[in-house]
Image: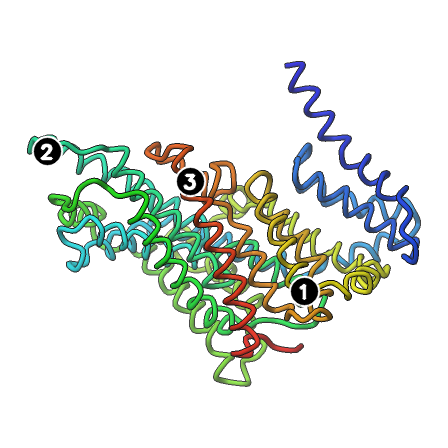
Amino acid sequence: MLKKSYKFWINLLSGPLVCLLVYLIPIPGMDPNGHITVALFAWLIFWWMLKPVPWVITSFVPILFFTATGLLSIKEIASFYGNPIFQLLMGVFLLSIAIEKHGIGERLTLSILTVKWIKGSVIRTMFMFMVVSAILASIISASGLAVLIPIGTATITNLVKKYEEKGIEVSPARLGTTFTLAALYGAEAGCVMTPLGAPHNMISLSLLENTTRITITFTQWMFTGVIIGIILLLLGYWVIKWLFKPGVENLPGEFEEFKNQLKALGPISKSEKMVIIAIVVMAVMLILPSFVSSFKFMDIYWVVTFIGLLLCMLPANESEPLLSIKDVSTKINWEITFMATTGVAMSGLLSKFGAIDYLSTQLAALNGVTTLIVAVLFTIILTNFVSGTAATTAMVTILFPIMGNIGIHPAAVARIIPALGVGMIFPWAGATAATAFSSSFLSIKDMIRGGLIMTAIFVVVCMVGYIFFVPFFGAYKIL
């Protein structure tokens, strides 16, 4: 208990102490107010990483700090929090809640896995798991894996029993590792495909708009994201096939297993139909502005906010809507929502007080790729040991204003950093990694071994791919 108490106080005091240390270090040429803002940002980064208090509480620090120092009034500082990232994250969380609550994710997974193409082949079944995981992750982020892993675990357990009944020796751990990593690497590939794939994507997109006046439409993100995602998916498949062979070629009855599980769900319910309608409406509204100019107001912020409202209005049955007040109040991840909003607010404050301009001037002489590589390494380390959301927010806040001056398009950086903010090396590297590890089939050793290789692949593919594809296809828009 004493050791835990020491750890708490060390983590709690780390923020203020780092803030004081940064403020006491001379920074020639920087505006004093900018220096103070940088010091405060260091405080927030440490509290985001070490989390001595909830992220929601950390969000109050800039409000209290700037009003106490007299730099801004309460109304002025509050205006920096008025960013659509808040509504965007709320809408995404509401969609994820609806999909999980009404069983659409499970039905979609089992429907795809009953495709006859995979019948009889372990490798094909494993690849289908990857594809399903990628599709789900591109829509509902880590929630997709939360749907897939329980199905995979139950299926593997039943298949092992069938092997034993036939007197065939098979390793449950080996087979389970293959399928668990397939789901994990598929989900990580899916996260880069759309802005909805991870909270990091939306945070990065919002910060890009705030700091550079450049945006990426849903269609533009998806066009380049799907290309990169497919490459990552295929390379992940190769890594599993090379390093984590299942030990058997055929799984007797796996097609029937999926079919029986799908049959057990019964006919599609009214609530499931309503959720599907909401998803279809969202997809149409996100794509429509790219083809009809009069619908330009339907950006991702507007559409996702509208879908959140729609989910609270469409009926699940005669007496209640798809989402209840309890769903909204208790199941939204307020931690990430407030943390992201604060990150966007801090980017505006760093710009207002000249810190971003100073940093741009100092780093303008550096080689752009070298600067980006350093940022990528920091992102990977922070993601796997602390928080991908915090790492992404910190890195893109610093990088966006600089990249344009040193030869790398900010819209490319907006894709690279969040793509590497999804950890897969350790079980504590985020919700996706933790969900995969929860299957109980995966050992720490195998997770680290595969995670290191896949992380290296992500670095190379995302850096080379986005630096080339974003400018080449013009996958961005000037506001």
Which residue is tagged 2? 168
In the picture shown, does residue 443 fall above or below 412?
above
Mark 2 and mark 3 lie on one chain; the one further toward the N terminus is: 2
Mark 1 neighbour class, 10 Å CA radius: few under 14, some 14 to 19, many 20 or more: some
Provide residue 479's location: percent of width, then percent of height: 67, 77
Instruction: Name the residue rendered at 22%, 51% in the picture.
Output: 123
Mark 2 secondary-structure assignment: loop
Please provide percent x and percent y for residue 182: 33, 48
Of 210 and 292, nearer the camera is: 210
Q: Nearer the viewer, residue 209 or 319?
A: 209
Q: Residue at x 59, y 67 (%)?
A: 412
The answer to whether 385 appears left or right of 51 in the picture is left
Quadrant in which residue 226 is drawn = bottom left
Tell me the distance, in whole angstroms, between the alpha carbons under discs 1 and 3: 30 Å
Question: Is disc 1 placed on a helix, strand or loop?
Answer: helix
Q: Residue furthest left?
A: 166
Q: Is residue 167 above or below residue 28?
A: above
Q: Earlier in the sequence, mark 1 or mark 3?
A: 1
Task: Say what amino acid the circle numbered 2 marks.
Answer: Ile
Residue at image x 51%, y 61%? 462
In the image, what residue type sits under mark 1? Gly
| CA gap, disc 1 and disc 2 | 56 Å
Cβ atoms at labels 1 and 3 below 8 Å apart: no
Q: Quadrant of the N terminus?
A: top right
**Pointer 3 residue:** 449
Label 3 CA crowd tier, 10 Å (few <14, some 14–19, many 20+)? some
Q: Position of residue 74 (x, y in %)?
A: 85, 52
User: What label sits on residue 368 in the rendered view?
Assistant: 1
**332 to the left or right of 237:** right
